[in-house]
Amino acid sequence: MMQLQQLELRRIALDLVTPFRTSFGTEQLRDILLLHVTTDQGEGWGECVAMAEPAYSAEFVDAAVIVLRDHFWPTLTAGGPITAEEVTERLARYSGHPMSKAALESAVLDAQLRAAGTGLHTYFGGDRDRIPSGVSVGIFDTLDELLAQVQGYVDDGYARIKLKIEPGWDLEPVRLVRELIGPDMGLQVDANTAYDRTDGEHLARLDEYDLLLIEQPLPEEDILGHARLAEAIETPVCLDESIVSLQTAADAIELGAAEIINIKPGRVGGYLEARRIHDLCVDRGVPVWCGGMVETGIGRAANAALAALPGFTLPGDISASSRFYRRDIVTQPITVDDGHVRVPDGPGMGFELDHEFLDSITTWSTTLNAS
Ligand code: OSB
Ligand code: MG
């Protein structure tokens, strides 16, 4: 049990090395909320993966600040001493805001593991010390720019390529990238909900490119549409946005809408729920992989520990920190060597902060006491 004492909410601004365009928007500057919790047994940090705009999901950074400050933190601390495993149930009466819940749980879990002198990798019991690394490639104005970018990632040694697609940017980019990388390298696409139920025949034309999967072609709520599409095309249908909990994962699998699942701890309310979804998928024989939300070294380290679990049989979106950032806020940023990322084995989530740099990019902070 830990007594929670203080929560510092801190916003940082980090430039992306190149603008990241998806079917839901373009990002150049990340506005990231970090949580720093102080307890009677030490400190922990968590990263909130909510984005600046409510586009990928309903959450966004300004809202995360409010819900954490005015609702989650007062309720969490009013209940007395706590373990990380109890954070979610203490917040159970609150609807939604999984990314904010996940961030709070992970800060408490980081503190708890550091106090115990153990790491997330050991806590989860994953059986690998390195995992294959995939890279997510945005949409570009021209095919030449896309191919140059992909060639760079191939040279970096990535184990697989994921292309962001949308109507008007799908068949031709995929054809050319498949031609560039050859038949053996893993290739997949992510539509971030950009298509609708009438696009089945069009999306079936992707079948000839031997893709690992198509991620979230249809809207978040359209489970039936995904099930029908999965029947109609050969490319396996993978869900991202639709999977917001263990329950939605179980139902989507049962309905045939999720042949593969992208697990993102923020989207499902935390690393512990993410682990339960992993276990369910292993039980149902559904392959999983770990998604990304353009995390700093905090989230990237924790994702790598999660992805070391045996059900993560496909390469995740856990790329080198340098894929997005010139400089990370941790002292040992995630790197890719021989197509793999090392699973951190340090205490807690397995990162150490570069405090000087972190302070230099902090744009706002507030410190809250326990209620
Ligand atoms: O859909 O997987 C997604 C980034 C932000 C929001 C949603 C997604 C993504 C990515 C990048 O594809 C994943 C990463 O490398 O962090
Ligand atoms: Mg996705």
Image: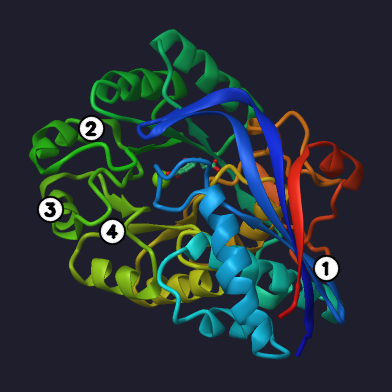
- Which residue does the numbered mark 1 point to in the structure image? 347
Q: What residue type is labelled 4?
A: Glu
At horizontal 67% and vertical 39% (from top left) the residue drawn is 320
Q: Is mark 3 on a helix, strand or loop?
A: helix
Closer to the chain start, of discs 2 and 1, is: 2
**Image side of residue 205 versus residue 59, left or right:** left
Quarter that holds the C terminus? bottom right
Whole-angstrom CA distance, mark 2 to mark 1, is 44 Å
Whole-angstrom CA distance, mark 1 to mark 4, is 35 Å
**Image side of residue 149 versus residue 256, left or right:** right
Q: Are marks 2 and 4 in contact (CB under 8 Å)?
A: no
- Which residue does the numbered mark 2 point to in the structure image? 206
Closer to the chain start, of discs 1 and 3, is: 3
At horizontal 56% and vertical 74% (from top left) the residue drawn is 272
Q: Is mark 4 on a helix, strand or loop?
A: loop
- Which residue does the numbered mark 4 point to in the structure image? 259
Closer to the chain start, of discs 3 and 2, is: 2
Tell me residue 211's x, y (percent).
Answer: 33, 38
Q: Are marks 1 and 3 in contact (CB under 8 Å)?
A: no
Q: Are marks 3 and 4 in contact (CB under 8 Å)?
A: no
Q: What residue type is labelled 2?
A: Leu
